[in-house]
Image: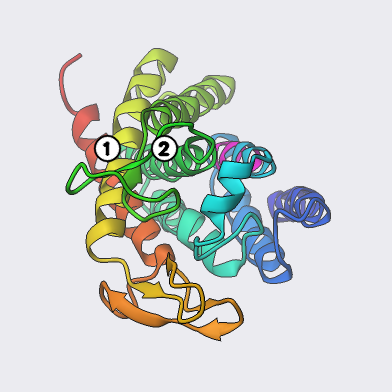
Amino acid sequence: MAWVYGFAGSVIIAGAAYWKKSLSKSGVLAAVLLGTTMYAIGSLAWFGTLIAFFISSSVLSKLKHARKAAAESGYAKGGRRDAGQVAANGGVGLLLCIGNAIWPEALWWYVYMGVMATVNADTWATEIGGMSRAIPRSITSGKRVTAGTSGGITGLGLLASLAGGAFIGFIGGLLLQAGETTEVNNAIVTLVLLGAVSGLAGSLIDSWLGATLQVMYRCQVCGKTIEKQLHCDQKAKQISGLRGMSNDMVNAGSSVIGGVICLVLSMLPL
């Protein structure tokens, strides 16, 4: 019955997201597959943490602001997530959940917390930081950059990132306690701290990768530097980064690093 419940819940949530234009058709299919499997082989804590990320990030993506809209014009993905973005944000978590189902160990959960804290922190930083009145600065040089530039950070974005990671830690700890899980230290305060620190660290790594390795293009029509290959209905020219190192690849890679950071921090005496 776990597969049935997981499928039903995933269809309802993904369907509502599609109706609200937070997911594309491919994103709905990917989300249903991801959510169903996570619920069936994991637990409420695994599934619920994933849903908490998805719902919170979807709500934030609908916030409208002139500065945020201008920044998003250069993003590789808009507010409507497709299958690639769903996989980049949740695929690593699913693999960890499968690993835990095969070989139950606390380490899987801590890595999962770091992964989800990173993707949530990065999403909150993008959505909330995009509304900042301050001019972003490059994480590599400290120089001012245009809003929407990969690797650009603001004070508001950093605070949002910290809050996003802490939120995942809080939800994870709350759901662990609700499920009476005893294999891990499920103190909510501990997981909030782990989520906040690993989420912020992973988000900063995401920004650094975005500024150094992510493929970037220049629009041949308007001259804007962008993350996506098509702009102004024309094919843009690659100007930096590694071919194939898309925004999705950067998100997935930084989330893995965030997960490792969370695992290492969990091993330190508190």
Quick one: SS at disc 2?
helix
Question: At x 57% / y 44%, what residue is drawn?
Answer: 68
Q: Is residue 122 left or right of residue 73?
A: left
Q: Position of residue 2 (x, y in %)?
A: 69, 49
Q: Quadrant of residue 232?
A: bottom right
Mark 2, residues whose alpha carbon is within 10 Å: few (<14), some, or many (≥20)?
many
Q: Which residue is mark 2?
A: 117
Q: Which residue is mark 1?
A: 201
Q: Quadrant of residue 86?
A: bottom right
Which one is earlier in the sequence, the residue at label 1 or at label 2? 2
Q: 17 or 138, which lies in front?
A: 138
Question: At x 80% / y 50%, what residue is drawn?
Answer: 20
Q: Is residue 157 left or right of residue 176?
A: left
The label nearer to you, 1 versus 2, is: 1
Residue 27 in the image: above or below residue 152: below
Boundaries of the magenta span:
47-55
Q: Position of residue 39 (x, y in %)?
A: 62, 48
Question: At x 42% / y 43%, what residue is drawn?
Answer: 122
Q: 217 or 109, which lies in front?
A: 217
Seen from this angle, which residue lies furthest front?
A: 222
Mark 1, residues whose alpha carbon is within 10 Å: few (<14), some, or many (≥20)?
many
Amino acid bearing label 2: Ala
Seen from this angle, which residue lies furthest bottom?
A: 235
- Asked whether disc 1 touches disc 2, contact meaning CB atoms under 8 Å apart, the reply is no
Determine if the magenta segment contains residue 258.
no
Q: 43 or 47, which lies in front?
A: 47
Amino acid bearing label 1: Ala
Q: Position of residue 118 (x, y in %)?
A: 38, 42
Residue 87 in the image: above or below residue 16: below
Q: Determine the main secondary structure of the stretch shown in magenta.
A: helix
Could you tell me which quadrant the C terminus lies in?
A: top left
